[in-house]
């Protein structure tokens, strides 16, 4: 394939993704600190300081019951939160009940409920991602803008997945275009010396040259990170259609839900109550830990998945990426307590967890969050530089 054709492909792929990457880079630079931003912007919702130094948090099962009573009648609270922080409220996701007349989910005015873990008082509710111009939902709207362009499914996933795929290809093409050209004439400088100039921004020169240097050098310095983030975007949005078929060459990721088909109608009431389900899930996880030689470090949550008729029990274990909330999961039947699925030890699962943790700044603590924030600004800068190069080129050719 000729260099001119690759350059043309790089240019058109950059034009197709440039504005999206500017938006994703800017929003991503903020969302690297999403939890801290939410607590700063919405302290009445997210902050729950203990009333006294000796105050104890209430039982997590009792807190779920309080959340269910406080929720609107058309909503379920289907999660027991087991991993709690001393200065944070509990955020419960509300799921809509099925309307028996229509068989469809009932509409909800709010889909999140915030509860104090110390006395169970409701600190507020909100409709996640509703508006950029409401304080309660501004940060969540940025998140929705970042991962879905604030568009409804499935179009958001298709568009962003395609952008991630184009970005992945463009990373590979862009790297190739920075490599030194073959020359028929002998050169005193070696290959690396000639390529090294592509990594630098010249000290002087006209605006177009400076813009090209910024675009090329930033692309090289950020290349590996861009490739990881681009492919992670494909994983998030085109997991079954593109990511898993391609990655099966390297490692197969077992489908956690393969053995639990969707039921005709979501279950209304589980046979196992919450505490019985928790005991069964803990026993199942302990047995799996002994069998597969991993350690459970902390519990995360227990969730009733009504459409599958199972409880999903998540923990943070030695199988998980260090610093992440944890995604080691066992599914148990909501009627019998039998194990229906497990995720955590497969090679493909670990690859997915690493990609997700790196993309969402959930590994290596605050220093990595700061790096991801700077990376987002870098992606926005090099994308803007690429768009500016195209604009100047079209102006020159139109004269």
Image (cartoon, rainbow, N blue to C red):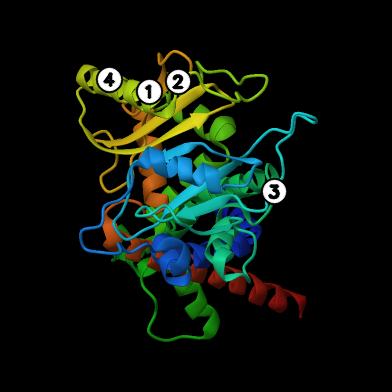
Residue ID at (49%, 18%): 271
Q: Nearer the viewer, mark 2 or mark 3?
A: 2
Mark 1–mark 4 CB contact (< 8 Å): no
Q: Nearer the viewer, residue 280 or 128?
A: 280
The kind of secondary structure element at disc 4 is helix
Mark 2–mark 1 CB contact (< 8 Å): yes
Marks 1/4: CA distance?
A: 18 Å
Residue located beneath label 4 in the image: 288
| Image quarter of residue 225 | bottom left
First in sequence: mark 2 vs mark 3: 3
First in sequence: mark 4 vs mark 2: 2
Residue located beneath label 1 in the image: 276
Quadrant (top left, top right, bottom left, bottom right) of the N terminus: top right
Residue 344 in view, yes or no? yes
- Residue 140 is left or right of residue 191, and the answer is right
Q: Nearer the viewer, residue 4 or 117?
A: 117
Crowding near the residue tagged with mark 2, few <14, some 14–19, many ≥20 C-alpha atoms within 10 Å:
some
Quadrant (top left, top right, bottom left, bottom right) of the C terminus: bottom right
Marks 2/3: CA distance?
A: 35 Å
Marks 4/3: CA distance?
A: 38 Å
Residue located beneath label 2 in the image: 272
Residue located beneath label 3 in the image: 152
């Amino acid at each position: 394939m000729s260099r001119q054709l690759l350059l043309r492909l790089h240019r058109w792929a950059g034009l197709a993704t440039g504005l999206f990457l500017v938006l994703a880079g800017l929003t991503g630079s903020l969302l690297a600190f999403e939890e801290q931003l939410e607590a700063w912007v919405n302290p009445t919702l997210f902050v729950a300081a203990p009333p006294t130094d000796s105050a104890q948090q209430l039982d997590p099962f009792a807190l779920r019951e309080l959340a269910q009573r406080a929720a609107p009648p058309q909503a379920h609270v289907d999660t027991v939160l087991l991993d709690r922080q001393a200065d944070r409220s509990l955020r419960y996701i509300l799921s809509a009940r099925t309307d028996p007349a229509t068989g469809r989910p009932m509409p909800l005015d709010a889909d999140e409920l915030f509860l104090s873990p110390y006395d169970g008082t409701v600190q507020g509710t909100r409709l996640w991602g509703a508006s950029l111009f409401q304080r309660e939902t501004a940060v969540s709207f940025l998140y929705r803008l970042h991962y879905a362009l604030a568009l409804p499914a499935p179009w958001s996933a298709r568009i962003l997945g395609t952008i991630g795929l184009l970005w992945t290809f463009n990373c590979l093409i862009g790297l190739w275009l920075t490599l030194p050209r073959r020359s028929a004439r002998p050169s005193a400088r070696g290959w690396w010396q000639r390529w090294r100039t592509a990594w630098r921004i010249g000290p002087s020169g006209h605006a177009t040259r400076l813009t090209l240097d910024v675009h090329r050098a930033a692309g090289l310095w950020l290349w590996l990170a861009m490739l990881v983030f681009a492919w992670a975007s494909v994983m998030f949005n085109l997991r079954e259609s593109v990511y898993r078929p391609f990655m099966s060459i390297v490692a197969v990721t077992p489908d956690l839900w393969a053995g639990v088909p969707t039921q005709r109608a979501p279950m209304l009431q589980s046979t196992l109550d919450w505490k019985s389900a928790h005991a069964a899930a803990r026993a199942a996880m302990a047995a799996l830990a002994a069998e597969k030689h991993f350690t459970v470090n902390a519990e995360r949550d227990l969730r009733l998945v009504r459409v599958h008729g199972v409880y999903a029990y998540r923990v943070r274990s030695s199988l998980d990426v260090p610093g992440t909330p944890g995604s080691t999961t066992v599914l148990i039947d909501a009627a019998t307590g039998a194990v229906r699925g497990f995720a955590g030890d497969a090679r493909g699962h670990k690859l997915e967890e690493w990609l997700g943790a790196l993309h969402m700044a959930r590994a290596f603590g605050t220093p990595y969050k700061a790096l991801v924030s700077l990376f987002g600004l870098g992606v926005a800068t090099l994308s803007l530089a690429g768009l500016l190069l195209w604009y100047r080129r079209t102006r020159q050719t139109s004269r």
